[in-house]
Amino acid sequence: MQTSENRTIAENAEKKVIQENGFDAKHPPDPSLIDTCVHCGFCLSTCPSYRVLGKEMDSPRGRIYLMDAINQGEADLNPITSQHFDSCLGCLACVSTCPSGVQYGDLIAATRPQVERNVERSLPDKLLRNLIFNLFPYPNRLKPLLFPLYLYQKFGGQKLVRSSGIMKKISPQLAAMESILPEVNLKSLTQELPEVIPAKGEKRYRVGMILGCVQRLFFSPVNEATARVLTANGCEVVIPKSQGCCAALPAHQGQENQAQAIARQMIDSFADTNVDFIIINAAGCGHTLKEYGHILQDDPDYREKAKQFSNQVRDVQEFLAEVGLTSKLSPLTDGELPIVYQDACHLLHGQKISVQPRQLLKKIPGVTLREPIDAALCCGSAGVYNMLQPEVADELGQQKAENLVNTGAKLIASPNPGCSLQIKKHLELQGKTMPLYHPIELLDLSIRGEKITTG
């Protein structure tokens, strides 16, 4: 016969097992946020992973059910359940769609560090993630690779590897990483923007500019164009040399300690610059920079600094639409130029920035805008998602490329480097040629009076 004392011991042991196999005590998904979900299913049609995989547990609603079950001790946090959290792109389309205002972004942001702390990954997955998170967020580690990558592209190595298909046989994830490798420009090895660039004409603002990690090495022309557009519109531009990554890559994948360390460095690099605003030209980076208050919520030394920093952050298109253009704009072609603007998820859903880029593009003489179907659906890039989950990402990338081409536009404007790489890859796979520019590059060309060729 079981005594009251024995029952208590058994119940405590059971609770211990549940606690060990569930979320730990450090910021688990908030039950009050979970309870706001009424399970209506509006999120299903806009969720990219659900569209591709077709499983309830790979939808926002299903993941919220799973979070609740783990919180209640009715399910374990283990490799089987965590794969449903890994399948989420973090695009936040469900947040835009939800009629109940469920803050799914906060829920998945709380869940991912739990997965990283409490779930043992397979050795290949662990090695790949270590490679990504010890390389991409650090420009000084990436930079020495530029010259070997240049030789790899210049002397036929890339064509040989891709035509043989050997990389995909070794590792689909490594093959996915190689497939989005942009053309390497050796100018990134030698050319650096000055620390302070004076405004042209009357100075209206003093702004800081963030260069990014992958952006500064593989998309340096976008940074150069950003600096020129800002100075042409009365901004003195400050570019601290000590800045590094924005922390988006580790933050979006639950690498909590790394994201916090990188965020502190970024805050420190702008601490004494006396800037009015801090400008970023990459959608995913901007969303993370505006989340520093959350990322550093447990740091008493940086909590308030992080909030102040985030309050100064503006996407470059958001900023220019807000303060207005003062520079003259010229046509980019001799006739009408139909452009399709690609909504990056972390601009559209994360920062609620959609109208401003379109307003700026329409100010360029001769430009007309075309809208694709499923404009709000993720392209499949999602930070490093297209490297970690290549099959789902490829299906989404194929759909996105087709939808953009089907608008009949002659040019794509894409405000995020990851989206640009993903779209270019799938245009090439479909045998389509369509120029792709960052919107700020188009403004820069228009200000300088240069023409473009659309093919």
Image (cartoon, helix red, strand yellow):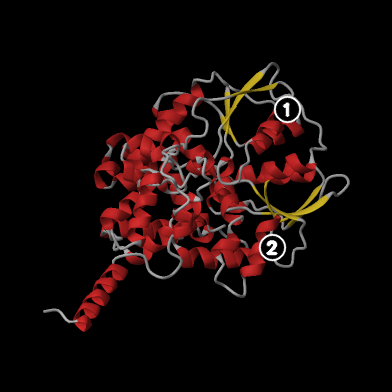
Mark 2, Cα crowd under 10 Å, few <14 / some 14-19 / many 20+, is some
Q: Is residue 184 visible?
A: no
Report which quarter residue 78 is drawn in.
Answer: bottom left
> Residue furthest toward the right?
202
Report which quarter residue 292 is drawn in.
Answer: bottom right
Work out whether 178 lies above or below 299: above
Q: What residue type is labelled 1?
A: Ile
In which quadrant will I find the C terminus? Answer: top right
Identify the residue under disc 1.
364
Q: Which of 282 and 101 is in front in this view?
A: 101
Task: Check whether the beta carbons of the residues at disc 2 and disc 1 lie within 8 A of each other.
Answer: no
Work out whether 29 lies above or below 5: above
Work out whether 312 lies above or below 421: below
The label number, if any, that marks residue 308 in the structure image: 2
**Disc 2 versus disc 1: nearer the observer:** 2
Residue visible at 36% across and 46% down? 62
In which quadrant will I find the N terminus? Answer: bottom left
Report which quarter residue 49 is drawn in.
Answer: top left
